[in-house]
Amino acid sequence: MKKKKWTLFDYVNTLIMLLVLLITLYPFIYVVSVSLSDSSYILQNKITFYPRGINLKAYKMIFESPKIPKAYLNTIIYTVVGTTINVFLTAITAYPLAKKDLVGKKIWMTMIIITMFFSGGIIPSFIIVQRLGMIDTIWAIVIPNAIWTYELIITKSFYESLPNSLYESAVIDGASEFRILFQIFIPLSKASLASITLFYVMGHWNSFFIPMIYLNDMKKYPLQIILRDMLIFDTARRSESLGEYAALTPEALKNATIVVSILPILALYPFMQKYFVKGVMLGSIKG
Amino acid sequence: MASLKIDKKPVAVPQPKKLSLMKKVKRDWQLLLILLPGLIFYIIFRYGPMYGMVIAFKDYNVYKGIINSPWVGLKHFRNFFTDPAFIKLFRNTFMLGIYNLFFTFPFPILFAILLNEVRNIKFKKAVQTASYLPSFLSIVIISSMVIDFLSPSNGIINNIIAFLGMEKIYFMIRPEWFRTVYVASEVWARMGFDAILFIAAITGIDQALYEAAELDGCGRLKKMWYITIPSILPTIATLFILKSGSVFRIGFEKVLLLYNPATYEVADIFATYVYRKGFEDMNYSYAAAVGLFESIVALTMLLITNAISKKLSEQSIW
């Protein structure tokens, strides 16, 4: 294409885009800067774009804190166990539903779709989980949302898009449905499963409401609950359990904890990006 | 034609429809076995709570359980409808939902259109990549950033306000600011993510259209107005309908993190009220009744928008 001269529009547009870039990235820059700065500069409001009096004290404090490493470990466990269950159940449940003439297909699909539009609500859900004795266990975190219907439907559509001849030739070779699913369909759906995995991982990593209602034992808290206590409740009220942070929650520590909590996601970001966009697109063609 | 029909007749075509139910089950037993764990999940954790909603008509007692708790009919609904909180909650939920819909919807479209006009491919890519960074953040972190940036003591927004010689604003305890704060942070957090679909729709536009327009002497703005926007209009319409159907389903987790007693009068919505009544006051039955009411209103909303959209554009979500 031939090069065209920049018009006024181009300059204005570039300016707008730079502004978007700044507004999007600034909070990240600020959080990292504060986490690395000396408290005297922070208290004087002197941090805007870069750290001053650079030090790693806040990060050291994270490792020495009695709660944060434990919570971090909990988050990792919940994410790994939860996502494994999510992806496994989603990948297998979608398979029979992708079969055109499955017996009772209409009933199963209707039953599943209804839950996208109507739910019993948090109180009855809580009571069910409580009745099953799951409160304060990892199961309350990983089981009650084991399948996200949206991701299930995406996976089902993907299976449907695979050529039928694959299935037929496997049947002729005498393969069982289990073998066809695990040795043909799942390996062929890697890209699609990767994007649903990403959404499940993010769901677990960032989840705060579910652990908040289902976990009472502080030793089992994931990172997000600790973050909420430190970042939000700390300023609002200082209850006994938070006293420990309240005494020493300097801004640097707060922000260092944010950095640490988003670090794994940022590190994976370049690799996950394509699956992320893909996941959004897959969702849009389901109808 | 007639001969063709006759030719077909003697051929024995397998007719799958004639299989009896039992035979079908026998044929599909492996598939049904694979489906079973998922079905059990849906029955227990999606239909279980729907059954659990009966506690809205009972006085639920933890020791007696769902079945043995005594029936009280519509007591909780009567209490709720006569409570002054009812009107307030209805208004707050509706207003926050509407504001959120109307302000968060246009930004991703505008962003996608302007991004498409960026000449430098690398810059374009960089802006887009950065734009969905916020959607990886948790609600807790977004909320805490909001509180931090708006803080009257050291928040950057208030620093700017002070720098301009105006009086600092206590955003988080001022009811009149709550909706603005909520919606603005939602725009920040979701714009890049929501733009993905529009960007894809724009990428799909036939380049020949632009070239033809150029030959006709159309400038950039004209091309945007007469080609880009009309081309993505169906995507816009579909997404708008989808979103307006869920206008009542507000991301209440963020409200829970951002509100406080000082802003309850505008910030308290059905979902947060259910949360407080249920988990703080332990009034499960009453909270379940409010939750049930909310679910029904939300579903009605969805059905209405879907019916409207079916009439207007033959687009339906099912």
Image: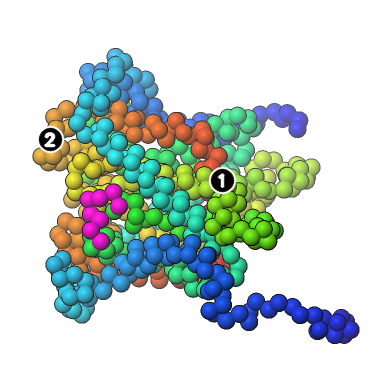
| Chain for disc number 1 | A
* Residue B295 seen in this snapshot: no
Estimate the x, y position of residue A33 in percent, counting from the top left.
34, 23
Segment colored magenta: A132-139
Establish if A39 lies above or below B234: above
Q: CA distance from mark 2 to mark 1?
A: 47 Å
The answer to whether tags 2 and 1 share a subunit is yes
* Residue A142 seen in this snapshot: yes
Residue reaching furthest left?
Answer: A240
* Label 2 packing within 10 angstroms: few (<14), some (14-19), many (20+): some
Q: Nearer the viewer, residue A240 or A131?
A: A131
Establish if B49 lies above or below A13: below
- SS class, disc 1: helix
Give the quarter of the image for residue A145. Answer: bottom left
Magenta stretch holds residue B211: no
Residue shown at 18%/79% (left/top)? B71
Horizontal side of B207 relative to A247 (left or right) equals right
Give the quarter of the image for residue A53. Answer: top left
* Label 1 packing within 10 angstroms: few (<14), some (14-19), many (20+): few
| Magenta segment main secondary structure | loop
Q: Nearer the viewer, mark 2 or mark 1?
A: 1
Mark 2 lies on residue: A243
Estimate the x, y position of residue B279 in percent, counting from the top left.
19, 57
Residue reaching furthest front?
Answer: A174
Estimate the x, y position of residue B259 in percent, counting from the top left.
24, 48
Mark 1 lies on residue: A190
In this rendering, the count of numbered labels is 2
Residue shown at 24%/52% (left/top)? A214
- SS class, disc 2: helix
Q: Nearer the viewer, residue A181 or A6?
A: A181
Residue shown at 53%/74% (left/top)? B25
Horizontal side of B103 relative to B12 (left or right) equals left
